[in-house]
Amino acid sequence: MKKPLSFLPTFKSHNIALLIVSLLFGVVVYTVNIRRSVKEYQSYQQRKQDINRASNATANIRQYQAQLVSLQQTTLRPYDREFLLERLTGFCRKNNILVKTFPAAKRVVENGTAIINNTIEVEGRYQDIAALVYSIEQEDKLGAVSSLKFFSEKDRRTKALRLKARMVIRNLEL
């Protein structure tokens, strides 16, 4: 058996030393060159995305402005008692709902914001009352229904059960 050309006694130790040296060489090459190249490539990709966003900026601005206009149109309306009563009675006439009570609104100030609470009692079928609540909140944006309680009462004259609902509609006072 011939001695290896290195200062190590066996081929096995020579191969282990060669492996360790090549790993150290790989780590040095990675830290010096490859890591910097990877960072530059990532920076290049980021700049490329920024350029694409900048080229689409005017279209995005128009889209955001259209969204803003639609959001401003769909926000809750400021409190107007006559408008609220007009919309409620119009919907109730179409859907055979009877407005039982519509007392004066209560004004509450929370965190410097004036909130108007309207308590309304209606009588009718469940589907019609649910449609009324949906119309108040989603279609007409008359306010936010913060409380809704269904209950039934027996009419003393006709001895029939009547479904009623008491709801609290909240509005902001501007």
Image: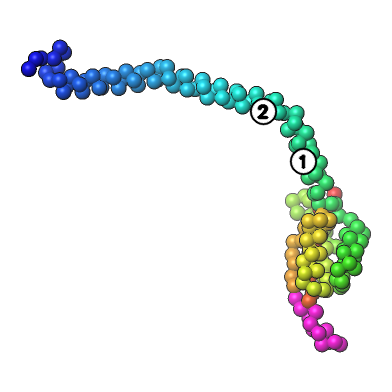
Q: Earlier in the sequence, mark 2 or mark 1?
A: 2
Q: Residue furthest left?
A: 1
Q: Percent position (x, y) of residue 116?
A: 82, 58
Going by the numbered disc 1, the residue's amino acid type is Gln
Name the residue at 49% across, 22% down.
Answer: 39
Percent from the top left, x then y, of residue 131?
79, 64
- Judged from the image, the secondary structure of the residue bearing numbered disc 1 is helix
**Residue 37 image point, x, y percent:** 47, 19
Number of numbered discs visible in the structure rendering: 2
Whole-number angstrom distance, CA of label 2 to CA of label 1:
19 Å
User: Coloured how?
Assistant: rainbow
Q: Is residue 113 above or below residue 89?
A: above
- Residue 156, quarter of picture: bottom right
Can you see residue 5? yes
Residue linked to disc 2: 53
Point 69% across, 25% down: residue: 54
Q: Quadrant of the N terminus?
A: top left
Let me know if residue 148 is in the magenta part: no
Q: Is residue 26 left or right of residue 2?
A: right
Bounds of the magenta span? 151-162
Q: Nearer the viewer, residue 90 or 107?
A: 90
Residue positioned 35% across, 18% down in the render: 28
Q: Residues within 10 Å of mark 2 (few under 14, many from 20)?
A: few
Secondary structure of the residue carrying tag 2 is helix
- The residue that label 1 is drawn on is 67
Residue 103 in sight from this viewpoint = no
